[in-house]
Image (spheres, grey):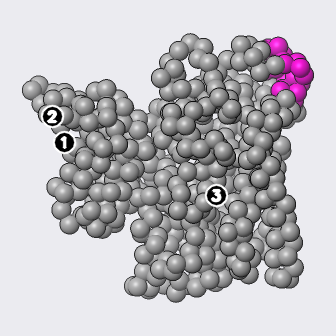
Amino acid sequence: MILMVHKVASWFLKRRVEVIEYFMEHPWEVQEKHFREIVKKGTATKWGEQYGYTENMTLDQFRENVPISNYEQLFPYIDRAFRGETDVLWPGRIHWFSKSSGTTNDKSKYIPVTEESLDACHFRVGQDALALYFTSKPDSKLFTGKSLSIGGSLSQNPHHSDIKFGDVSAVLTENLPKFFEMVRTPSREVAMMENWEEKVVAMANEAVQEDVTSIVGVPTWAMVLIRHIFETRGITSGNLLEIWPNLELFLHGGVSFEPYREQFQKMIPTPNMTYVDCYNASEGFFAVQNEQGKSDLLLMLDYGIFYEFIPLEDLGQDHPRTHTIDEVEIGRNYAMVITTNGGLWRYLIGDTVMFTSKAPHKVKITGRTKQFINAFGEELMVDNAEQGITEACHATGAVIKNYTVAPLYFEGSERGGHEWLIEFQKHPDSIERFTETLDRRMRELNSDYDAKRRGDLALGMPIVRVLPAFTFHRWMKKRNKLGGQNKVPRLANDRKYVDDILGMI
């Protein structure tokens, strides 16, 4: 059976490599095809009727007629579909909604997931990530064992019995063909448990009985599960290969992997381990790391998503002109806009990206349109913070569990600054050197930050507050956001999160 699975999977993945190579060579041709297919579907919706969709609608007409919308602006339509109304954003009734943690506000977001987006986007990225992996590792034994998938849970929609919602990972698990139960762990029953703390125990009990060859999930929650396994199995060496000697792949996404890379490399001490980054969200899967040793990601152009990009400096305009993939420039920050086969129309997803290549189209995620700090004109993005904290950890031997940052506003004669709340797994050998390295690296990366720090005129040295163990765990539990796709907000332009956390200590 294992040999048959390996042969069938290898044949299928080779076919996907051919598709990937095609859109790498013909990017605009593929994107234009998806644009026309999605708009054609939109003609049968109330949204399309409102904005004058026709089968022959041109891109210029689309840009002119259809507004760019964030979640709040699209919410009235999503809510109608969520309550069971048909043909609102996509033809027919939408039976699944992905519940986003809403990292920039306290409200959860409910993102429609159609049958088309499940098949052509959400499932396809796993296939393609494996296709690219097997291209570089043809002798892989991945399918001789099981994949450990770390995800969330589902809930019944109170408004309509045929509609369910939950973390996107849970939506995928519920819709996976039964065949995949043979090659994944934990069981579907455990994977769907709602109580995260109980689920960690159940997942660990099942997973340690299996030959796990790959892990799929958000690094923070994977770390929680692994540490629980170490504690309950009495493994003091911290070597995960004592449990899963054939582990060879970690497919991760959701948060930057860099602050966690060193921890995983210590827990999995083998040169044969591969880490593959994915750019995924509740709204869809967008990019995959296709080259080891390079942090930029290949933009996947045939997932039923039409991409537009707004130069970050134009974002506040009433009707900014968007750039398509044939119009973007390398090295420029863009806010990403998506039109999808999941019923999202010119949706401002909230992420900022920068193209590192156009042959093929590769990007790196630079931050969030809302998750940044610009209290003093410093324009600090998540990408700056992640690189700064990674270098500070390397310089001082520190290992972090989680962190968040907020501004410290002017008070009296005191300067403003940034306050970092950090929970360490291993404390730095010098908190002063950690802070200095963090500050220096961010000054190197961000000229606006450097200008405000120069002479300590506007911004003082960052203030790093070391939090007691499990502070972020308690805070996320308090907010009912343990596990699944939920993430600690990294940067905020106000002190709401920071003050709430400090109030617990």
Q: Can residue 96 be seen in this view?
A: no
Residue 432: give x, y in percent of width and height.
16, 55
The amino acid beneath tag 1 is Met
**Span colored in magenta:** 39-57
Secondary structure beneath label 2: helix
* Image-based side of 104 in relation to 206, left or right: left
Q: Which residue is drawn at 42% across and 42% down?
A: 382
Q: Of callouts 1 and 2, which one flags the residue occurring earlier in the amino acid sequence? A: 2
Position of residue 326 in the picture relative to residue 94 (left or right): left
* Res 326 visible: yes
Q: Do the residues labelled 1 and 2 touch (CB within 8 Å)?
A: yes
Q: Observer-nearest residue: 95 or 369?
A: 369
Residue 371 appears left or right of 299? left
**Mark drawn on residue 461:** 1
Give, as a three-letter code, the residue at label 3.
Asn
- Residue 290's tag is 3
Q: Mark 2 points at which residue?
A: 456
In front: label 1 or label 3: 3
How far apart are labels 3 and 2 at the CA level? 42 Å
